[in-house]
Amino acid sequence: MEPCELGPVVSQPSGKGPPERIDAAYYDRSEYFEAGHLTDRQSPFQRYRVEKILSIYDPAGEERVLDMGCGWGTLEWALGPHVTEIVGVDFSAKSIEMCERERAAAGLRNVSFVHADAGATGLGAESFDLVIAADLFEHLYPDDSERVAREAYRVLKRGGRFSIWTPHRGHILEVLKNNSILLKPDPTHVDYKSMDRLQTLLEEAGFVLEKAYYAESHLPVLRSVERVFMAGLPLLRRRIAMLGRKV
């Protein structure tokens, strides 16, 4: 799960007390990390996710990568064989323990995991070539998002890239979920960022924008429709992809 000191809030029914704050303990005690389509790295969704994230920026073999909010370690297993080093950061102890078990079993020496807040990783300044925040920003409050963007800038080398992949709130599936129509809302998605908001976050942190576009979903029929109509129809813009460069 994505690091966030304050954490999002889950509303409780009236008369049930104050809202529950989703912090690291929430993810550690919940079944968040047990979703089958996420634990299975060969699932259509995870294969689509890795492909689309790497299409934003595919690191070269000599690059050092930081994955903010590493969750299931998906990107570590995908990139580990192809880069000099990849470090996964997550504020959930459950996430890090799960990833460490798999890393030890796989024997990947250039993959490591750090239990830390993505807004204050404690990692060295100007020590990475690429920072990835995949499915992270929708889980963060505005203040936490600003901290994460600044931290990404701090740990990147000059010329390094910051890659972002996040859901678009205006897509039909997100609209249905967030209105509890046919689909259940995800209570951890507390602050979807628009394209404009993400661009502002990056620029205020010091980045120069290199890429910003919408991407289609992994569902075959819907994907075909999205490719044709997403340019003029926000309801068919499934994901936001963005790339900033540290100058």
Image (cartoon, rainbow, N blue to C red):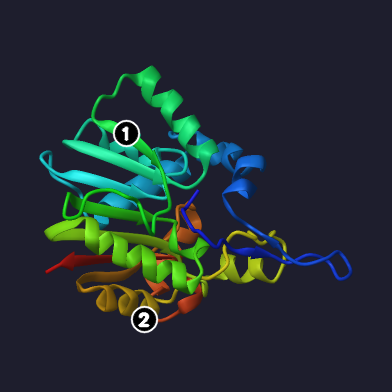
* Callout 2 crowding tier (Cα within 10 Å): few <14, some 14–19, many ≥20: few
Q: Is residue 196 above or below residue 244?
A: below
Q: Which residue is mark 2?
A: 196
Pick the front one: 102 or 94: 94
User: Which residue is rendered at x = 50% and y = 59% of the image?
Assistant: 5
Between circles 2 and 1, the one closer to the viewer is 1
User: Which residue is rendered at x = 47% and y = 45% of the image?
Assistant: 45
Q: Is residue 237 visible?
A: no
Instruction: Tell me where residue 14 appears, x and y as whole percent.
Output: 86, 71
Secondary element at tag 1? strand
The image quadrant that residue 64 belongs to is: top left
For residue 158, side relative to residue 185 (left or right)? left
User: Which residue is rendered at x = 78% and y = 65% of the image?
Assistant: 12
Instruction: Tell me where residue 133 appears, x and y as whole percent.
Output: 36, 56
Q: Is residue 176 visible?
A: yes
Q: Is residue 113 above or below residue 106?
A: below
Instruction: Tell me where residue 93 appears, x and y as whole percent.
Output: 52, 39
For residue 246, side relative to residue 168 (left or right)? left
* Residue lying farthest to the right in this orientation: 15
For residue 230, side relative to residue 159 (left or right)? right
Secondary element at tag 2? helix
Q: Which mark is residue 112?
A: 1
User: Which residue is rendered at x = 57% and y = 67% of the image?
Assistant: 190
Instruction: Tell me where residue 179 appears, x and y as whole percent.
Output: 69, 71
Q: Is residue 193 above or below residue 30?
A: below
Q: Amino acid at mark 1?
A: Ser
Pick the front one: 85 or 155: 155
Of labels 2 and 1, earlier in sequence is 1
